[in-house]
Amino acid sequence: MTEMPGMVRTVLGDIPPEHLGVCDAHDHLFLRSPMLPGQELDDPAAALGELTAFAAAGGNAVAQWTPWGMGRRMADLPELSRRSGTHIVAATGLHQARHYDAAELARLRDSLAEMFVHELTEAETRAGMIKVAGAFHHLDHHTRHVMAAAAHAHHATDAPIGIHLEGGTAALDALDVLCGTHGVAPHRVLLGHVHRFPDPAIHRQAAETGAFLVFDGPSRAHHGTDWRLMDSLAALVDAGHAHQVLLGGDTVTANARSTADGPGMSFLLTGLRPRVERELGADVATAIFVRNPARAFAVNWRDTLH
């Protein structure tokens, strides 16, 4: 891989993007929410087992999209990275309002941008991306407020913004707000869960802006659209957008790990990557798993809020 500009901020420090390697571009080692009672990812030993299995399958890096206030266990991530030998990119940001205590959100409301910048540039374990979340087929008031703060933090740092698209919807609305209203360059935006709404016209329109499209899974919760994955990838490749596609496991429950009922992070490399190579070619597979994540997470870091 040729040398790229910028640095990827991992929990162990900044690395050149060409050192990121084979990347799971959207996943969770830890996750906790009142909306998912009894389904917490909160076991460091299990997280290490998942990372170890991913590394054994040829994986080198994982982007954990768990944002602030959802049990992301930032202090545990550096040791997990060291012990597993995998790079970890952590997230700051906020999810949908329903995942938080209302009083806590109110307390943070006017300081979100500053908090995001602090976690990206000054925290003991630093984030390397910002996470925001849309609502189902629309962007509610909370989403728009968090997006404004995320855009402010992006302009202060150049950090990429990953978007949870609820059910894969409202991708174009999200791009209109972040890029149109707030001036975020489209190539700094990662649209998550696009496979959950497998509309090829929407995928193509989103890709034409320059944004990254993040497909994740498979999952039991979204199995109804998993079978469309390869068709969606092929359509984007045929339209000339292979350089904007990312894949992730999006493991959100303990039972979904490779050490439980699966398929887990390692399936990206033992199941999906061979199929991508067979059906779309080895170069496309390398783009999706290596070159594209390196560009998506590489940042020309600016460390002051302005």
Image (cartoon, rainbow, N blue to C red):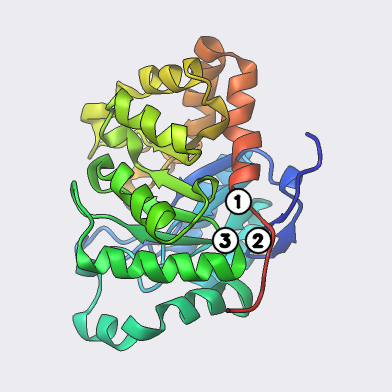
Give whichever of discs 1 and 3 has the lower sequence position.
3
The disc placed on residue 297 is 1
Considering only vertical position in the picture, is 32 above or below 180?
Answer: below
Residue underneath mark 3 = 159
Considering only vertical position in the picture, is 270 above or below 246?
Answer: above
Q: Using the numbered discs, state the Cα–Cα distance from disc 1 to disc 2 in whole angstroms.
A: 8 Å
What kind of element bears circle 2? strand
Do the residues under discs 1 and 3 have CB atoms within 8 angstroms?
no
Q: Residues within 10 Å of mark 3 (few under 14, many from 20)?
A: many
Q: Using the numbered discs, state the Cα–Cα distance from disc 1 to disc 3 in whole angstroms.
A: 8 Å
Q: Position of residue 93 (x, y in %)?
A: 42, 67
Give whichever of discs 1 and 2 has the lower sequence position.
2
Q: Nearer the viewer, mark 1 or mark 3?
A: 3
Pick whichever, 251 or 104, lies toward us.
104
Q: Position of residue 4 (x, y in %)?
A: 76, 44
Do the residues under discs 1 and 2 have CB atoms within 8 angstroms?
yes
Q: Quadrant of the C terminus?
A: bottom right
What kind of element bears circle 1? helix
Residue underneath mark 2 = 9
What kind of element bears circle 3? loop
The three-letter amino acid code for the residue at tag 1 is: Phe
Residue depicted at 40% across the width and 56% down the height? 178
The three-letter amino acid code for the residue at tag 3 is: Ala
Q: Position of residue 87 (x, y in %)?
A: 65, 53
Residue depicted at 25% across the width and 36% down the height? 220
Number of marks drawn? 3
The disc placed on residue 78 is none
Left or right of 61? Residue 101 is left
